[in-house]
Image (tube, rainbow, N blue to C red):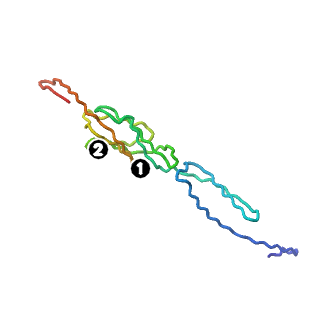
Amino acid sequence: ERSRGLGDVYKRQVILCICLVLFSGADNIKTGKHNLVIVADDDKGNEGSFEFEFTVNAVPTKLEINLLSNKLKPKDTLNLEVFIYDQGGDLIKKGINIEVFNANNELETTLNEKSEEEIQLKLGEFAIPGKWKVKATSVDLVEEKEFFVEEVIDKEVYLEGDLVIVRN
């Protein structure tokens, strides 16, 4: 209650409301800017709203290797693509580490590339026949794919000076 000096008395009741809103979006929310509108009303007909904008950052959630061929021979080229998807299922461009293991599970090569780019890797002339593996890692994601190097039964005979060279 307060007097303004002219005999008028005003009564006011002030209610301070501090609201805490915890918002957890869907696990598959799209990356980018979003708007959230909060609307409140009471049983006396009062209402109000508040709108704010927030940004969702891309979170890598899935790594996928696409081998364009899974049966190769020595000297063939392995063509592959690696894709990284965020929580909303959208492709994101990010650095990846690629390791290729031969049929004896020995590391043949390591590459550092960007996702979504076609990667070409030429197999050696004496690539070991059998099941090979491509392993891709990015952030905390790991994906592996297998491919097969077939045995080549072929021989090459040639003369080098006084030597006869036979190569299979």
Q: Secondary structure at mark 1?
A: strand
Q: Secondary structure at mark 2?
A: strand
**Image: 142 above or below 120:** below
Residue at horizontal 52 percent and vertical 48 percent from the top: 88
Residue at horizontal 39 percent and vertical 48 percent from the top: 142
Given this view, does label 1 or label 2 mark the residue nearer the observer? 1
Q: Nearer the viewer, residue 137 or 73?
A: 73
Q: Horizontally, is 134 left or right of 51 in the view?
A: left
Q: Nearer the viewer, residue 145 or 37?
A: 145
Residue at horizontal 14 percent and vertical 25 percent from the top: 164
Residue 137 placement (x, y as % from top left): 39, 47
Tell me the CA gap for discs 1 and 2. 19 Å
* Residue marked by disc 2: 107
- Amino acid type, callout 2: Leu
Circle 2: is it few (<14), some (14-19), or many (20+) Cα within 10 Å?
A: some
Quarter in which the C terminus is drawn: top left
* Residue marked by disc 1: 141
**Image: 125 above or below 42:** above
Q: Nearer the viewer, residue 14 or 90?
A: 90
Residue 5 placement (x, y as % from top left): 85, 75
- Amino acid type, callout 1: Leu
Residue lying farthest to the left in this orientation: 162
Residue at horizontal 16 percent and vertical 23 percent from the top: 159
Q: Earlier in the sequence, mark 1 or mark 2?
A: 2
Residue 42 placement (x, y as % from top left): 72, 64
Q: Are marks 1 and 2 in contact (CB under 8 Å)?
A: no
Q: Which mark is residue 33?
A: none
